[in-house]
Image (cartoon, rainbow, N blue to C red):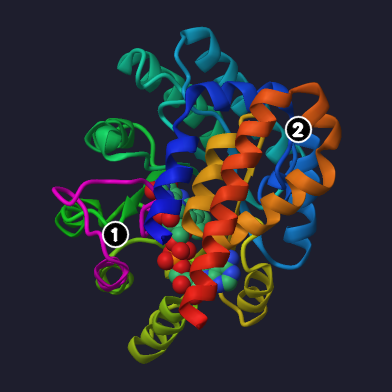
Amino acid sequence: MVNVTRDFFIGLSNNKFLNEYAKKWGFRLGAEKFVAGTTVDSVAKVVKELNSIGISCTLDNLGEFVSDKAESTKAKEEILRLLDRIHTDKLDCHLSVKLTQLGLDIDREFCVENMKEILTIAGSYGIFVNIDMEDYSHYQQTIDVLLELRKDFDNVGTVMQAYLYRTEDDLEDLKDVRLRLVKGAYKESSDVAYQSKEDIDRAFIKIAKKRLEEAEFTSIATHDHRIINEMKAFVKKKNISNDKFEFQMLYGFRTEMHSNLAEEGYNFCTYIPFGSDWFGYFMRRLAERPQNVNLVVKDVFCKSENQLKKEPIITGAIAASILLLWRKQRRSKRDKAS
Ligand SMILES: Cc1cc2nc3c(=O)[nH]c(=O)nc-3n(C[C@H](O)[C@H](O)[C@H](O)COP(=O)(O)OP(=O)(O)OC[C@H]3O[C@@H](n4cnc5c(N)ncnc54)[C@H](O)[C@@H]3O)c2cc1C
């Protein structure tokens, strides 16, 4: 059941039509719990609040399925304005970007030029820029672009996914690069990626420990308390300084753990997505944690009566699919209990 749910939401996240539609539709389905508004003002307010309790942030100006240069240029300009805002407001904050948003699928050189422009301004403000890792079809290109950019810029890093078999080997050449380590959010085949939670967790722990001992700086990005506890015990045992790593979690997930880890003296960074292009991101979060479907069900059926009247077919289709899943989940829970 969990896999069916996961595949269903990953399918929705990749649906170009729904992504486009959702931009016009505005925030719906409870997305505001995981996406910090659609404007720079709204996200700056959230960052200030988190900074005031010792939490730093990384901002993701959401955008996927960019298919023409004008759209990528617009995204780049928004990112440049965001950098100005981080600098002017003195926010403790760096950036997360996606290469496909900046034109990787349109024209590689155009994408590299966009990144160079961003990194030049970010560098002048002392701001780090992390390149999110997307699905496996973009993996090698992302690493290649990173290495090209690293020739001229040291304020850029990327994300490595523990579910890929090749990650451990690839990390050997990236020890001097600041990286975020994650489990991996996309549906990948068993030809390239571990499929079971046990294998993925084992790979994550092994790689994270190696990075902590050997590499420049690592962001340990997980909501998994078991892994976090193991990392805490490991750094204590090995006497590894807190300056060598930070914990990262997504905005809206396990928020009590964010402030607890910051209070315990660990560097903590919240990944904050914002913007009108929220649908794909939100669907991937539902894929990871089907329990969140309950939030969506509540939102669709308690708040969206007007939306149903305005856009009956599409709202109805999404709502019906989600309700179906929710009922299946409840039934499978009841079956297990009985
Ligand atoms: C900051 C950040 C950046 C990321 N960037 C990328 C990226 O660039 N590319 C990419 O592919 N992926 C990215 N991801 C997503 C990542 O790959 C995983 O898909 C996602 O983090 C889910 O895995 P997990 O490590 O949190 O643990 P999971 O395996 O999802 O959860 C492990 C356990 O933790 C507990 N748990 C988890 N969430 C909750 C919750 N909300 N409430 C209560 N208990 C919970 C449960 O016991 C669960 O069994 C990012 C994740 C983070 C946190």
State yes or no: residue 180 in magenta. yes
- The quadrant holding residue 163 is bottom left
Helix, strand or loop at disc 1?
loop
Q: Nearer the viewer, residue 331 or 202?
A: 331
Residue type pointed to by label 2: Thr
Report, in whole angstroms, how far the alpha carbon at label 1 lies from the one at label 2: 32 Å
**Residue 180 found in image quarter:** bottom left
The image position of residue 249, as x and y in percent, is 55, 61
Q: Which mark, residue 162?
A: 1
Residue 238 location (% of width, % of height): 33, 87
- Above or below, 329 against 301 in this view is below
- Asked whether residue 220 is in view, the answer is no
User: Which residue lies at the image location 41% right of the left edge and 29% below the top edge?
Assistant: 99
User: What label sits on residue 39 in the rendered view?
Assistant: 2
The stretch of residues the image draws in magenta is 178-203
Up-down: is 21 above or below 159?
above
Residue at 29% over, 74% down: 209
